Image: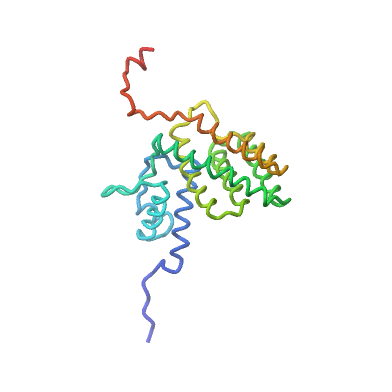
Amino acid sequence: MAAKTRPKSDAPDASDRVSRIREGVTAAILEHRLLPGTKLGEDEIGEIYGASRTLVRTALQQLAHEGIVNIEKNRGAFVARPTPADAREVFEARRLIEPMIVDRAIDAVSPAWLDRLSHHLSEEREAERRGDARASVRLSGEFHRLVAEMSGHGIYLGFLKELIARSSLIILLYRRHDTPACGTDHHAEIVTAIRKRDREAARAQMLSHLREIEAELFLKDPAADELRLADVLGA
């Protein structure tokens, strides 16, 4: 007797497909290809990744838990729109953990890690030279993630990945248009301090770098005070 054909199932690689969806959405946010407020249709995402709606929903729920996606009842999932208050909290959190991350990274200094950091800086400079804004934004976030990987602290790395994704949305929403998002010179200074195993300088450079990024944001909530056209157009 011929064996019955079993219905197609994505159960064996469910975890892998959920991870691919999460990584794909996160990468698109980091590169500013997905804008805040964009609707994330389950059916469309399922077609793109060859996954069931159940797996797509699982991935979106995980991203919502990380604050990268908002899920609204009867409306679906949307790329999050962080508020100015959210932005301040994100950068406060980064100022708390990234100096500790770079301190631990110094403990892991090796020729191999220094080569990886130097190669990454070269990629950042090349993206900046050719005017590739999307690559520059992605590589900027990856620099901070790379230092966290170097630290060997899994919990910090997990936290920072979430904060970097949120930071990307914040920068997209609130960055002043005439300022760079994250300068390669700052990253080079951090790497120099790591190479010299200068903990104080590395921590100071990281804090200064994060403060400067936040200072370049226009964190004013439009709802905080009433906007009068006469004030804007009559100036």
- Up the image or down, 94 lies above or below 175; here it is below
Spot occupied by residue 235 in the image (x, y as percentages of width and height): 39, 12
In the image, taking residue 211 as reference, residue 225 lies left or right, namely left
The front one of 144 and 34 is 144
Question: Is 198 drawn above or below residue 233 in the view shown?
Answer: below
Q: Horizontally, is 83 left or right of 177 in the view? A: left
Q: Residue furthest left?
A: 74
Q: Name the residue rendered at 39%, 50% in the picture.
A: 64
Give residue 30's position: percent from left, percent from top.
Answer: 50, 43
Among the 4 quarters of the image, the one containing residue 86: top left
Instruction: Give the percent coordinates (x, y) of residue 168.
Output: 48, 40
Residue 100: percent from left, percent from top: 58, 46
- Residue with the most extreme bottom position: 1
Residue at 52% x, 54% y is: 155
Q: How is the image coloured?
A: rainbow
Q: Nearer the viewer, residue 138 or 156?
A: 156
Q: Residue at x 57, y 38 (%)?
A: 136
Judge from the rendering whether residue 89 lies leftward or rightward of residue 125; answer left or right: left
